[in-house]
Image (cartoon, rainbow, N blue to C red):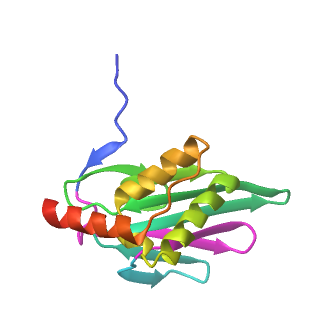
Amino acid sequence: MTVPPSPMRHRQPSDDGMTRVELTWIEKRIEHWIRFGRVAVDEIVDRRRRIVQFRPGAIFAFVRWAANDYGTVSSRIDIVRAVGANEPFTTLPFVRPGGDILLKIEGWPKVSQVLAAIDATEAAGVDPCDAAPDHWRHVANRIAAGQQPRPYTIERHRAWLKRREIEG
């Protein structure tokens, strides 16, 4: 019996340790964009494509939307932590080598709930890429269960910063 390979991989992300995300924008057909995240390198490939790079540990939201002549065929959002050398990761289309997926949501109604949670985090005065990774896992789990996620408050953020300080 052959065991299929695990989606978790261990290897060096790239020679420079960066995670690369390929972005495409073909008006009303394919739109891949970064909703939040600190881009370390932004390379324009052509008028429709860019490649952005993130340093290890960076958290970013990657939105993918596609349509045909009849309307939307796919919409999804992934919130990902870029991995460093020898860290386990999960592969993800258009993300090389992959990352630690904190949230993975498909379907426009649920994607819009995630976008609202991101907006609420920003409204609380916190940059979403600085929010606790566990918050994004919480948002994914609550939306999957059909429940409203708890808001990320400045108090929660201060608690996360203290926890990170103690663990670090």
Q: Nearer the viewer, residue 119 or 94?
A: 119
The correct choice, above or below, for 27 with respect to 79 in the image is: below
Q: Where is residue 149 shown, x and y percent of the image?
A: 53, 53
Q: Residue farthest to the right?
A: 70
Q: Where is residue 73 shown, x and y percent of the image?
A: 73, 53
- Tell me the quarter of the image containing the N terminus: top left
Q: Nearer the viewer, residue 52 or 125?
A: 125
Q: Residue farthest to the top?
A: 1
Q: Residue at x 75, y 60 (%)?
A: 67
The correct choice, above or below, for 6 with respect to 103 in the image is: above
Number of on-image labels? 0
Using the rendered image of the protein, determine whether residue 20 is visible from the camera's viewpoint: no
Q: Where is residue 40 shown, x and y percent of the image?
A: 35, 80
Q: Residue farthest to the front?
A: 155
Which quadrant holds residue 119? bottom right
1 vs 70, left or right, is: left
3 vs 165, left or right, is: right
Tell whether position 19 is magenta.
yes
Q: Residue at x 36, y 54 (%)?
A: 134
Q: Nearer the viewer, residue 147 or 107?
A: 147
Q: Nearer the viewer, residue 151 or 98?
A: 151
Which quadrant holds residue 54? bottom left
The correct choice, above or below, for 129 with respect to 40 in the image is: above
Which residues fall within the magenta stretch?
Answer: 12-37
- Tell me the quarter of the image containing the C terminus: bottom left
Tell whether position 90 is magenta.
no
Q: Where is residue 160 shown, x and y percent of the image?
A: 29, 64
42 vs 30, left or right, is: left
Q: Residue at x 53, y 68 (%)?
A: 118
Using the rendered image of the protein, determine whether residue 51 is visible from the camera's viewpoint: yes
